[in-house]
Image (cartoon, rainbow, N blue to C red):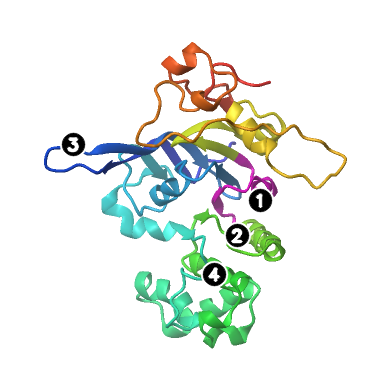
Amino acid sequence: MSQAPVMTAENLARHYEVGGGLFRKPQVLKAVQQVDFELYAGKTLAVVGESGCGKSTLARLVTMIEEPTLGSLKLDGKDVLPQHWASLRQSVQIVFQDPYGSLNPRQRIGQILMEPLVINRPDMSKKDREEKAREMIRLVGLRPEHFDRYPHMFSGGQRQRIAIARALMLEPKVLVLDEPVSALDLSIQSSVLNLLIDIQERMGLAYLFISHDLSVVKHVADDVIVMYLGRAVEKGTKEEVFGNPRHPYAKALLSATPVADPELRKERIKLTGELPSPLAVPPGCAFAPRCWKAQDKCRAETPKLDGGEHQAACFFPEG
């Protein structure tokens, strides 16, 4: 019997009106367009792409910070509707990129961890809240005496562990990780990533991992979505996407990823041209102006994401 997804997104889109005035209509910025995915317990779906491709906007939609313009989200098979956000947010938590800005400097760590319980579990006793906070401190690898300290007393890696502990206090089913290690030193990144993998195995969480660092994604992901200007252009398992990228953009991204083997030579694909403005996306395939395989059809029609389990939105895919 196949496992049911914890969360499902269908044709998810988010548009913004930008500019405009007394005699001028506002422009529409399509930050996310027609994105589909499924999140499973114990699995990690990574979303990768250049800055401005819509990764963080997608994270805000999944965590119910913003309402989608089009499409739908389902949690445990039930529609995620704005009137139910208050209760559903307990099942979907987020860890932000900046461990320095995401913690209140005026609160002790114990207060920071107990605050979600104070707000969402008002019937829980103070003793039980404190006990759960101390248990979570141990889970993320910190010491008991850290309970009464302030955020400025910790390193970046320790602060991110605190942020992870706070996100776990309500026992969520889905954890959104928005560039969780990009602000950390390389020596600290691996320990935080290994902690996240260990927590996922213990608690059976579904992860949505947002990142631009493909070497990190290769370490943690089970499945990968590659985005370009708000659209998913490739989707498949980690092995398929990294081993045999089908979309030219995905192939170019992977060619720029450094490898540890000095004997392995990779051909670097250098993209020409600038990333188009999201307010003036070219017709047809948005990647066509920078693509070495583009033909007239690419400039006239928008390719759909298809191809079975390993999908690519390209008329002339690689491989």
Task: Evaluate if marks 2 and 1 touch, with contact meaning CB atoms under 8 Å apart.
Answer: yes
Q: Along the polypeptide, which appears first: circle 2 or circle 4?
A: 4
SS label for mark 2: loop
Magenta stretch bounds? 203-223
Q: Along the polypeptide, which appears first: circle 2 or circle 1?
A: 2
Task: Report the residue at 39% width, 22% height from top.
Answer: 283
Q: Along the polypeptide, which appears first: circle 2 or circle 3?
A: 3
Per the image, the residue denoted by label 4 is 165
- Quarter of the image holding residue 262? top right
Query: Could you give the CA–CA distance between mark 3 and mark 4, rounded to whole angstroms?
Result: 45 Å
Query: Could you give the CA–CA distance between mark 2 and mark 1, rounded to whole angstroms?
Result: 9 Å
Q: Is residue 310 visible?
A: no
Per the image, the residue denoted by label 2 is 181
Q: Position of residue 138 (x, y in %)?
A: 63, 76
Task: Evaluate if marks 4 and 1 touch, with contact meaning CB atoms under 8 Å apart.
Answer: no
Query: Could you give the CA–CA distance between mark 2 and mark 4, rounded to whole angstroms?
Result: 15 Å
Q: Position of residue 26 (x, y in %)?
A: 22, 39
Per the image, the residue denoted by label 3 is 25
Per the image, the residue denoted by label 1 is 216
